[in-house]
Image (tube, rainbow, N blue to C red):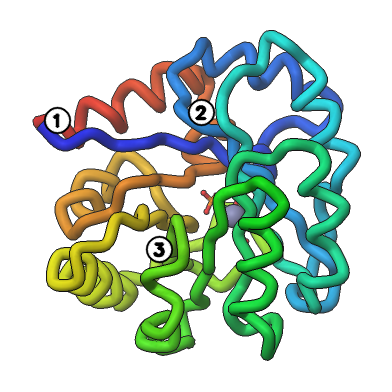
Amino acid sequence: LRKVILAPSLLSADPLNIALDIERLKGECDWLHVDVMDGHFVPNLSYGPSLVAALKAKKEIKWPIDVHLMVEPPENFIDLFLPLGVDYLTIQIESTPHVHRVLQRIRDGGAKCGIAVNPGTPIEWVEPILSFVDMVLVMSVNPGFGGQMFIPQVLKKVEWLYRERVVNGLDFLIEMDGGLGIDNVATVVNYGCDVIVAGSAVFGSSDPARALKSMRESVME
Ligand code: DX5
Ligand code: ZN
């Protein structure tokens, strides 16, 4: 049995009822994924540190908070999030020439560090930092919006990461984000993904807990 970490993306939650939407997950989630967009690195705006602070302040919310920064440059923003006690802080590899330094600062700030790779970016770019990161996020859509179509060509990147991890005895997690749902979760997990981010497939469903449960069961079949 493969264990999968399910991380619903709050981008697709009802912004006027985020707390209610989190309750509707009924604990079927493993992490909560928060997308931070700056209207510069990506052509959209979304949540920021105030939402993360509110999530962290609510004691009923006990799941790790997985923050995905789509901002440029990330070094100007990480200090807004680290003091809040975020669990994972992921930056995009395309967003700064100082990737290693920023990851180091995230580590030093007490969070696990992740590196995200856009669909058009070669996965080999992460090779020099693989032994340093806690997670690699393979983007399976172009970042900026929920509800887009899954780009299957990124699966080769997961194969490459999986092999690198085995060959070098590393232990980073492989996360995938974008266009994921009941129809393709089992496939991407079989390729080697550990963490599944899903927005519209969860919150667009009439029963988000049921949607998560179906995804988990599809992986275990
Ligand atoms: C896209 C975001 C995703 C988004 C995924 O830029 O990084 O986390 O919420 O949404 P779905 O699951 O609807 O593709
Ligand atoms: Zn995301």
Is residue 144 placed above or below 218 in the rendered structure? below
* 3D distance between C-alphas at marks 2 and 3: 18 Å
The amino acid on which the numbered mark 1 sits, given as a three-letter code, is Met
Q: Which residue is mark 3?
A: 150
* Between 184 and 154, the one nearer to me in the picture: 154
Disc 2, disc 3: CB below 8 Å? no
Q: Is residue 55 left or right of residue 107?
A: right
The residue sitting at 70% across, 64% down in the picture is 105
Which residue is denoted by mark 2 in the rendering? Answer: 205
The first of marks 1 and 3 along the sequence is 3
- Given residues 21 and 195, the one toward you in this image is 195
- Residue 211 numbered tag: none
Sequence-first tag of 1 and 2 = 2
State the image coordinates of residue 119 (x, y, percent, origin top left). Answer: 46, 78
Q: Is residue 149 above or below residue 215?
A: below
**Mark 3 residue's CB less than 8 Å from ligand 1:** yes
Left or right, 147 with respect to 190, comes to: right
Q: Residue at x 80, y 38 (%)?
A: 84
